[in-house]
């Protein structure tokens, strides 16, 4: 995984966002990643999250996207 993807997965685990958790807005996750771990632009974080949610981008989707992805 790329560093931004690792940071997203770590931030999601810190927020308690696992497979059985309720959905939260992606802005919450991206805000945590930007504030704590990834001091670059928010567009890179959003793009990495979208790629991790798309079933055709990776062999296994790492993020369960809901709604308008």
Image (cartoon, rainbow, N blue to C red):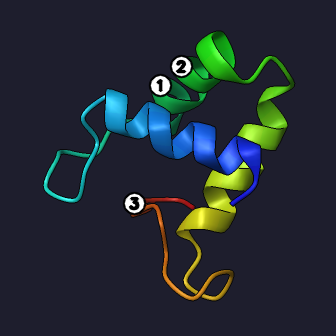
Q: Position of residue 19 (x, y in %)?
A: 22, 59
Checking the image for residue 32, the label placed there is 2
Q: Quadrant of residue 59?
A: bottom right
Relative to 63, is 38 above or below? Answer: above
Give the x, y percent position of residue 50.
Answer: 64, 59
Q: Is residue 16 above or below residue 1?
A: above
Where's residue 48, x and y in %?
A: 71, 53
1 vs 3, front mark: 1
Tell me what residue is drawn at x 43 percent, y 59 percent: 67
Q: What residue does disc 1 label?
A: 28
Kindly report which numbered mark, 2 or 3, lies closer to the viewer in this rendering. 2
36 or 65: nearer the eye?
36
Residue 52: give its label: none
The residue pinned by badge 3 equals: 66
- What is the distance, in whole Å, between disc 1 and disc 2 at their CAs? 6 Å
Asked if residue 19 lies left or right of residue 13, the reply is left
Mark 2 residue element: helix
Instruction: Judge the density around disc 1: few (<14), some (14-19), many (≥20) Cα neighbours within 10 Å.
Output: few
């Amino acid at each position: 995984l790329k560093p931004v993807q690792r940071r997203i997965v770590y931030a999601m685990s810190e927020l308690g966002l696992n497979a059985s958790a309720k959905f939260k807005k992606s802005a919450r996750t991206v805000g945590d990643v930007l504030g704590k771990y990834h001091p670059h632009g928010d567009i890179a974080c959003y793009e990495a999250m979208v790629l991790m949610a798309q079933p055709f981008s990776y062999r296994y989707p790492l993020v369960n996207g809901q709604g308008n992805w």
